[in-house]
Amino acid sequence: MSAVPLVGARASRLQERTVSVLGATGSIGSSTVDLLRRNRAHYRVEAVTAGRNAAALAALAKEFGARFAAVADESAYGALKDALAGTGIAAGAGKAALVEAAQRPADWVMAAITGAASLEPTLAAAERGAVVALANKECLVCAGPLFMKRAAAAGATVLPVDSEHNAVFQSLGAGERGCVRRIILTASGGPFRSWSLDAIRKATVEQALKHPNWSMGAKITIDSASMMNKGLEIIEAHHLFEAPPDEIDVLVHPQSIVHGMVEFKDGSVVAQLGPPDMRVPIAHCLAWPTRIEGANRLRLDQLANLTFEEPDETRFPALRLAKAALRTGAGAPTVLNAANEVAVAAFLERRVGFTDIAALVEATLDAASARGILADPADVAAALALDRTARSLARELLPEIAAKAI
């Protein structure tokens, strides 16, 4: 059984809830913090974490009276400890400290740490039966079956924060799971939606980072431009909703108003609409199964039109690669994600071109298959080991891909 809860009876009022925010200074974390400020009466903060920004993390910990704060970068520990001196707030650093933050007694945990580094702390929160608001795709892409199985065994509730999956989650409440014909994720199409393939090949970092609708971190913005983001979301949806790959479709929707849809067997299509603001799905998860005041409202009378189109997998091959990795199964999604992270980092460092991102991912998948290293990870250690191997392989192939682009 999926750890994603079925929509049932609604609570009449929100009880006070203790929360921890993993990745509190990032894009999702900052949106979460904004909502906590707007609804202070309902929440108490237990723990907050960040990558290396000790000053910003300490300020948040003091503002909300957190009991524990941790940075992933151990070199930032001294700065964090000094900033929290005399406050009574405990400080930590490194992987073990992130896991400790997740294990502390909070009812609700925002899992917004970027990349595969989120797997261990997010799983730690799930394994103690917490409500986990999952904003990180890599947990399910790298170790989906393992993560969902352990979450279900612990009685954890996994709530999807991604706007698309949150929309599907809300739409699924309109009917029984067995009556679903297909799940539809929408994609903005990114900044290159109408560009020719030749123009996309010449795209700069600055152009790729200019998302038309959303304000996000650099990594996810590049993934949106390549549509790898949508490919990862297909894999995520497969695990969240126990949906076969053939029941998950993608439609390009440039306005980013309809975030996801569910088509039922009777022909009904139920959709969730909202402004392109991550505070909307975060607010839904923060208060589930009730509701709180959000930030922005959708004004339907101010919308000119809503359009939809099929994605072009020739210009955006990352979508094709992700679908193939899901169908291959076992360790292929883990390799896909690891290679993509290496490729995106190389693009942001201007070491490869934009279309080289998908080229490196495909070359890494082919090489991993040829070397017979696509076995299904049996545990977290195996998933992280495969992730490291795939990254190493992608880095080996990087000079070859870069040379071909010249």
Image (spheres, rainbow, N blue to C red):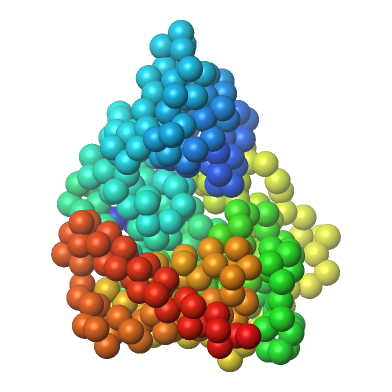
Seen in the picture, residue 389 relative to 288 is either above or below; the reply is below
Q: Which residue does the image show at 78% across and 72% down from the upper left?
A: 305
Q: Which residue does the image show at 42% across and 28% down from the upper left?
A: 77
Q: Which of 223 and 107 is in front in this view?
A: 223
- How many numbered dots are placed on residues in this image? 0
Viewer can see residue 236: yes
Seen in the picture, residue 376 relative to 298 is either above or below; the reply is below
Seen in the picture, residue 21 relative to 119 is either above or below; the reply is above
Q: Nearer the viewer, residue 269 or 132?
A: 132
Viewer can see residue 268: no
Q: For this view, does 331 lie left or right of residue 267? A: left
Q: Which residue does the image show at 80% across and 64% down from the upper left?
A: 303
Q: Nearer the viewer, residue 174 or 248?
A: 248
Q: Nearer the viewer, residue 131 or 11?
A: 131
Q: Position of residue 243 (x, y in %)?
A: 35, 74
Tell me which corner region of the image, top left, top right, bottom left or bottom right, holds residue 11. Answer: top left
Q: Which residue does the image show at 72% across and 54% down from the upper left?
A: 298
Q: Where is residue 49 in the image (x, y as percent from the top left)?
A: 44, 35
Q: For this view, does 21 lie left or right of residue 120? A: right
Quadrant including the N terminus: bottom left
Q: Position of residue 85 (x, y in %)?
A: 46, 12
Tell me which corner region of the image, top left, top right, bottom left or bottom right, holds residue 316. Answer: bottom right
Q: Position of residue 5 (x, y in %)?
A: 34, 54
Q: For this view, does 21 lie left or right of residue 332? A: right
Q: For this view, does 252 lie left or right of residue 360? A: right
Quadrant including the C terminus: bottom right
